[in-house]
Image (cartoon, coloured by chain):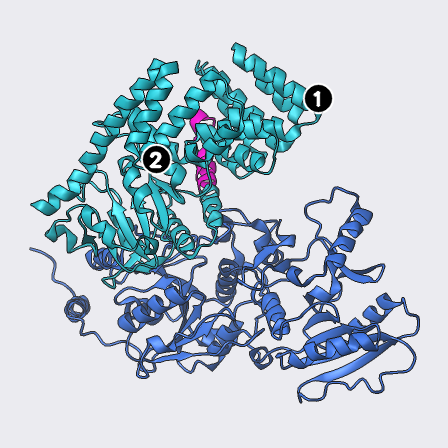
Amino acid sequence: MNYLIFSHSGWGGFPYKRLLDILPDRRDVYFIVRVDEEEESGFPVKSLPLSSIRTLDSSEFTAIVASPYWIQTIREWRPKHLIAALERCPDEEETNLWNKYSGLLAGYADLVITSSEKIYLEQCLRRDGVILLHGDDPLSYGMVTNPQDQILFLQDYEALFVQAVSALNRGNSFEQWVKKQWELRERYYRSLNEQIRQHETVNYLLASYLYLLNDAAAEQYLTISFEQMLLKDFTGCLHSHYRFFSAIEAKKGDLAKAVRIYAISAFSEAERNRVRLLESWLEQGEDRLVKAELFRVNEDYRAAIRLLKEMNSPESDNLLLQNYVQTFRWEESLPLLDQSRLSDDDKTVREVLQGTVHLIHNERHLAVRTFLRASVRDWNVLSRIAEMLQLEQAANRVMGEGEKGHAE
Amino acid sequence: MPAPIPPDERNLHQLAGRFSQLSRLGMLPFPNREGVTIIVKITNPQWAAACLRLLLLHSEPSAQIIAVPERRDLPSLRHLFSEDDPIAFMPYEPGVDLAGKALSEAATPFAALLEDRVLVTPHWLSRLIWPFYDDDNVMIASPKSPAEALDGRQNVPCQSLEDLYRFVSDNQHKEYGTWHAVPVFTGPCLLFRTSLLNAIGGVDPLLRNRAAKTADWCLRARQIGGKLALCEDVYVHALHSLDSAGFSSREWDPFCAKWGLPEMDKNLSVLAARDFASLPLLPPSPLRKEHFSPPLVTAIVLLRDDAERERWIHFQENQTYVNVHWIFIRPGIDGFAGWGFPGEKSTWQADAILLHETGDWIRGLEAALKLAKGEYVVYFSAGPNYPPDYMERMVDLLFREPSDIAAAASLCESSDIAAAASLCEQESGPVRPSSQPPPFPLPCIAHRHAEDIGSFLVDRSSLFLLPRSSQRIVYWHDEKNEDWIVGGGEE
């Protein structure tokens, strides 16, 4: 497999150089910015000007994209496989823009990699196929021989990355490796918990991994975390923890209890309406809808989407739509929106999603026209045009890094 | 004025200085002319290639390496090495203790046993051998490594072989020549006197993991007065597998039963804390010749009528396993005339049992087990589509894990699985205790030939074995990707 790497701030600031050395099944690895000769000598990576990517057969490439601002280029070039490398927003970037387009990029990716455990857990609750580029085990988990015939030892997360990418290249499922990483993280937090007992964050993270592994023991550790937070006067945890308890009960199958737990932290009008809706679904025996909605309100969109995709009713489609919108799978949400009878507000939302999808597909004029049309109903939509310009500037900046390097 | 150094001590100082000088220049000869046999257990082709290369690079030229495959599906590695390299590759044989076979043939006074996860470093062998000359009672020596559980556990965090060499080079003089006796080893790299094999035999094949086997063998060596030397001046790196399930106390049950322990703790610290060496001497595990060829397997074939026999016969002819004792069970009174017992393969033997009452299968099975001569028992019927290497693979599973029962779930017929589910409910109600294995359709299992393997059940026309809860079951999960899942008795 050939790899094409899209960085955010050039070769010098590229944080995943070691990964380029351990890529599985590699033929050629190209980097879309200038790679200094001296530095390049240590890594078997070829520089490629952006303008040359059209000469490459994209069906033979796996792209690793380390900046959300390459999204338009990627959608146009369409590599065989897309690996999105998501990181926290750099200081110099605008947070909303970065996070939104990171979410959209992840929505198109086959595999998401990140060195941030916060982003990792968020993504694990949004989608399948996420690998954390961080581990706490100092042992060597296997080895690879790099193109210079050097033996490299892999840490656990590197071995998981190699296995997952190798499975991706072969068209096989990589879920066993994703699950394996949950098990490794669970084992790590369990041992940490044995050392520092009663720590709210350690217990919360342990509960999170147990939840992902469908282990009912999650509840026990979440309870400890909750008690510790209350003891330390972190009262803001009521909402988040009760949602989590409710999702755990939903996974266990006690839906009436799950709804009751959710109701405890339902303060707003919208939340109280949702409780009434959940109760009526319970009465009607619509258990899967109840489950999916409880997953969604705990931000476990992955479990919700999995459940809703197997259903086919106006209610399930409506919930699926909300999950797609919240996980930035906007392109998939559009057909569902088209099926629905839309209120004026919904129509505006639809236009905003459609306009963004046009933008991502490099259909600039269609995007502008769509945003303008929506702005007739809601002038706030005009801010999308400003955001569009922001994205273009950001994209030009990351592209400029490459072209500048080659022009020098 | 300093006191004059006595002549003997001065002599010693001078000799030590000369030794150091020669050692620094790499001019010290290996202290053993007969050489060392190095046995490497192969589990992973990529690791093995690196392990063998480093062994060739960093061992003395007199060392002879024997590579023994630990799995049946490993590709050959021979093409990666030249004819001149002192490596012998043993062919795979199902149900055979290949490492034991290699050890029994070792003609050198020292042998090393390694797993292919071990990556040796410069001077590993020339340093590991000195404790045997320092002290006649030293029987086993081990380097430090990340795969050792107790004394001797050290992990050098390194991203590459270069990092590893740098560490070894920077530290090689720090502990030069230092070793101390330890209570036990559990790791994957041991050097030992081959005379030890005559005294205590090889490793106990019924123990379930490497740490247990190594610990048991070392403790038996200590029982006869042997010392275990941990060399502080040798570090070998070790690779770990993502597939490792971590510590399981059930894995240690046979070890604990053997050494009178209630249970094993997660850190194995009880191994170092107890004085096992003073316990009554445990019997040796002799390296027997009969373990060095494929064991006799009794195949019990359940056939209802002539039509089933017709369907079955081509599976039988295709079976590649060589050492089989066939027992046929069929209802009827007219004997087996015309059934044509297999006589094509000279090593095959056959017996037959007739059922006078059509439904009396269970008595027939009990009689068959009394007749069975094999070390393992495999069941067949005309239903499943057995691959030609079915018996080889079942024997392999039972031997390698090691386990009491092997179950090939993918060969089960759906009607048998449904019947097994209904039997589950009859036996223990809808909620089964997690420790209780399910009943297994008989035509998809094999087991060790033991006194009490469990009980046979019959449901409509299907036959099942309900194992005892203490038995260890290994599942042949997926015949395509060889993805074995160990379960049942595990948890």
Three-letter amino acid code at the position of disc 1: Glu
**Horizontal and vertical percent for residue A44?**
21, 57
Q: Is residue A162 above or below residue B22?
A: above
In-front residue for pair A113/B202: A113
The question of residue A196 being in magenta is answered with yes
Q: Please, which chain is the residue tagged with disc 1 on?
A: A
Instruction: Please provide percent x and percent y for residue B396.
Output: 58, 69
Percent across and percent down for residue B88 are 40, 80
Instruction: Please give the name of the residue rendered at 84% of the width and 75% of the height, measured from the top-left corner.
Output: B305
Q: Position of residue A336 (x, y in %)?
A: 51, 31
Q: Does residue B364 appear in the picture of this structure?
A: yes
Using the rendered image of the protein, determine whether residue A267 is visible from the camera's viewpoint.
no
**Which residue lies under the disc numbered 2?**
A116
Is residue B68 part of the magenta span, yes or no? no
- Location of residue A341 with respect to B342 vertically, above or below: above
Q: Which residue is mark 1?
A: A283
Q: Is residue A259 left or right of residue B304?
A: left
SS of the residue under disc 1: helix
Sort mark 2 into few (<14), some (14-19) or many (20+) by Cα contacts within 10 Å.
some
Q: Which chain is blue?
A: B
- Please provide the residue range marked out in magenta: A185-201
Taking B380 as reference, is B335 above or below it? below
Above or below, B171 relative to B305: above
Q: In the displayed structure, does residue B290 sit left or right of residue B7?
A: right
Q: Nearer the viewer, residue B94 or B269?
A: B94
